[in-house]
Amino acid sequence: MLKLPDNLSISPGLAPVGRVIPVLAVDNIGATLQELSARATQFVIGREYAAQVVSKVDDKAYLVKIDNAVLKMELGNTAQAGQSINLRYIKDGPAPTFFFMPQASVPEDGAPELSQAARLIGQYLQEAEKNGVSNKFEATAIVTHAPKDPQMVAQGLRQAISNSGLFYESHLSEMLQGGRSVAAIMQEPQNQHQNLTQIAALTSQQLAVLEQNRINWHGEVWPGQMMDWDVYTEPRGEEGGEQADTQHEGDARPVVSELKLDFPNLGVVAAKLTIINGYVSINLRAEQDSTMDELRSKSRALTQAINNTGLKLDGLIISAYE
């Protein structure tokens, strides 16, 4: 178990608290192990807690009160009874795990004072940069085991994005309004056991989505088949210059979905779908000539399938992938 350095004067950044052992009040010494466990896991993962050092147990261990629980923690040899500390709860087991949150330093005159949330985000971004985290979301679960069923593939892709954790805060808002179940929320990464690196990576990717209005997804769409998938909102004036941007300022912005797959027999196939105001334009590109011929032979069926969705096909282009 990682332990906090002996000196509590930690440089900016998160530091793991040492071994944490749940401690019951004196009048509950005869309680069961189940109650011990319940006391230790009453905390919410990811939440920050204001704690107070109650007393010293030995050279490095102290009793620390957090809400209504008293825990034994290894804080080093410079902590003092009565000292207030900030802790962030990271995971439940095999032992309750907290991170020590350094106290904010007093800003210099004229320097902006950041909120605790802003400082925490900054720490996550530093951690993500240190580990070379990409803006591309790397999925760990297979999307579907039914690749021949388009509806199952589409449903699986939708679920993969929904459960990615990239939109966790908006899903919480939906839950409070009755639009999303607690069970669905609990499936997202924020409610799973994560280490600091994983939390930092997800926070960085969430901010990238917010800033760029773009999702970069990479994963196994069905067993053995990898896929790159980008979904983004096209900026106004992308085609037509400044004049078009001014004339269509009130219009909806096109939503673009781009897929790229490298099939064992068909080679690389890329698709770009642009949807706006009920119209969709499709650009299909294939690496092999035989694959382009196959796509052209299926173009009529594709057109009918698009029309059956209620969208209107604005254009279909099939060309070589370069």
Image (cartoon, helix red, strand yellow):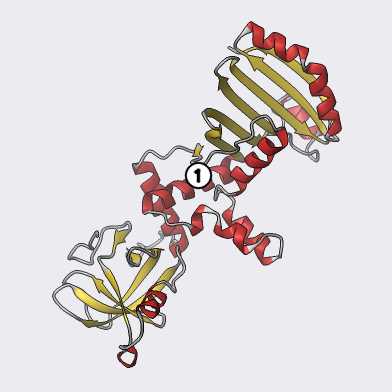
Relative to 168, residue 220 above or below: above
Which residue is at the front of the view, 10 or 87? Answer: 87
Q: Quadrant of the N terminus?
A: bottom left
Residue 271 left/right relative to 309:
left
Residue 309 left/right relative to 6:
right
Look at the image and tell me whether residue 115 can be seen.
no
Relative to 45, residue 253 above or below: above
Relative to 287, residue 217 above or below: below
How many callouts does the rendering have?
1
Look at the image and tell me whether residue 304 can be seen.
yes
Q: Quadrant of the C terminus?
A: top right
At which x and y percent is residue 101?
34, 64
User: Residue at image x 68%, y 11%?
Assistant: 292
At which x and y percent is residue 73?
26, 72
Residue 150 left/right relative to 61:
right
Pointer 1 local density, CA inside 10 Å: few below 14, some 14–19, many at least 20? many
User: Residue at image x 53%, y 33%?
Assistant: 220
The type of residue carrying mark 1 is: Gln
At which x and y percent is residue 294?
71, 12
Local SS, label 1: helix
Query: Based on the displayed image, in which of its 4 quarters is residue 33 positioned?
Result: bottom left
Query: Based on the displayed image, in which of its 4 quarters is residue 103 positioned?
Result: bottom left
Which residue is at the front of the view, 15 or 160? Answer: 160
Query: Based on the displayed image, in which of its 4 quarters is residue 173 positioned?
Result: bottom right
Q: Which residue is mark 1?
A: 205
User: Residue at image x 25%, y 61%?
Assistant: 10
User: Residue at image x 54%, y 38%?
Assistant: 142
At which x and y percent is residue 213?
62, 41
